[in-house]
Image (cartoon, helix red, strand yellow):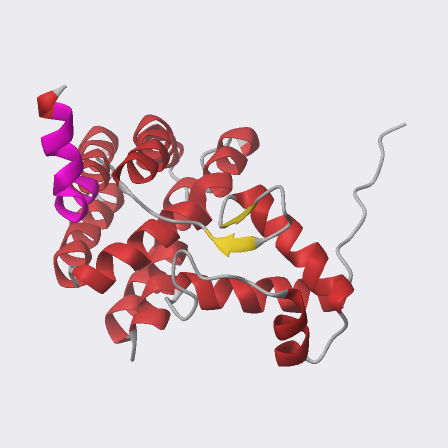
Amino acid sequence: MTSVPTPIPSRTQFVLEGIKHRILTGQLPPGQALVETDLAAQFGVSKTPVREALKTLAGTGLVVMNQYKCVTVRMVDADMAREVYDVRLLLEPEALRRVVRRGESLDAARDALTRADDAADTAERSLANREFHRALYAPCGNPLLGRMLDEVRDQAALVSAVAWAADPSWEREASEHREILRLALDGDAEGAAGALHAHIASFVRRAFPQGQEEDGQR
């Protein structure tokens, strides 16, 4: 008999989404200590939902728990960024290729792109961009492939938040997003997949050029 996953209690989910939003919008920067008592007071809950939320965030790679039970927002460096984006490079273009070949609707991607263009701040733009990318791969017809990409989505957003703080490059990325969507809507599966691959690969090169220099010295 298949077991049914235990749903996350509503208070834990509330705290989880709140902390995640603060991390991905830069309100809680990498390296920031996350103290249970402080977070409980800020969210108006007991420490239990905070503790459970932090455990879940540790599982997604957004926070780090050490042996002394201290919790911090995960640091972002070139190695971490390359690891996350390498997974995306391997999986995301193939997922989009399948979406286009299947003739799936890309209305959600178009809507997300519009929201990103109309965003009033970086937080809104970041969330819309995440939805844009998910809308490109979610209808690929392989739920496991979609879940694998979902697992690295938050870490990719953390990398973007750190990179944007140093170099706000969203206008260039928005232009690349529009080209990817145009190719996909035209039914050009290979062209859309290639444009998406180039978009993902170029982001890390632009955001963490020091990592490229280190690779060249090895």
Placement of the C terminus among the 4 image quadrants: top left
Task: State the residue at coordinates (70%, 58%).
Answer: 51
Q: Quadrant of residue 164?
A: bottom left
- Tell me if residue 106 can be seen: no
* Residue 117 relative to residue 133: left or right: left
Tell me if residue 4 comes above or below residue 218 in the rendering: below
Q: Nearer the viewer, residue 166 or 1?
A: 166
Residue 88: give x, y in percent of width and height: 35, 34
Magenta highlight on residue 212: yes
Residue 201: give x, y in percent of width and height: 20, 36
Q: Which residues are magenta?
A: 203-215
- Tell me if residue 70 can be seen: yes
Task: State the residue at coordinates (49%, 50%).
Answer: 62
Tell me if residue 95 comes above or below residue 20 in the rendering: above
Task: State the residue at coordinates (77%, 63%).
Answer: 48
Tell me if residue 130 comes above or below residue 184 in the rendering: below
Q: Quadrant of residue 24?
A: bottom left
Q: Nearer the viewer, residue 176 or 185?
A: 176
Residue 146: give x, y in percent of width and height: 50, 36
Name of the residue lying farthest toward the front: 68
Residue 212: give x, y in percent of width and height: 13, 33
Total number of numbered labels? 0
Placement of the N terminus among the 4 image quadrants: top right
Q: Main secondary structure of the magenta part?
A: helix
* Residue 217 relative to residue 186: left or right: left
Q: Quadrant of residue 114?
A: bottom left
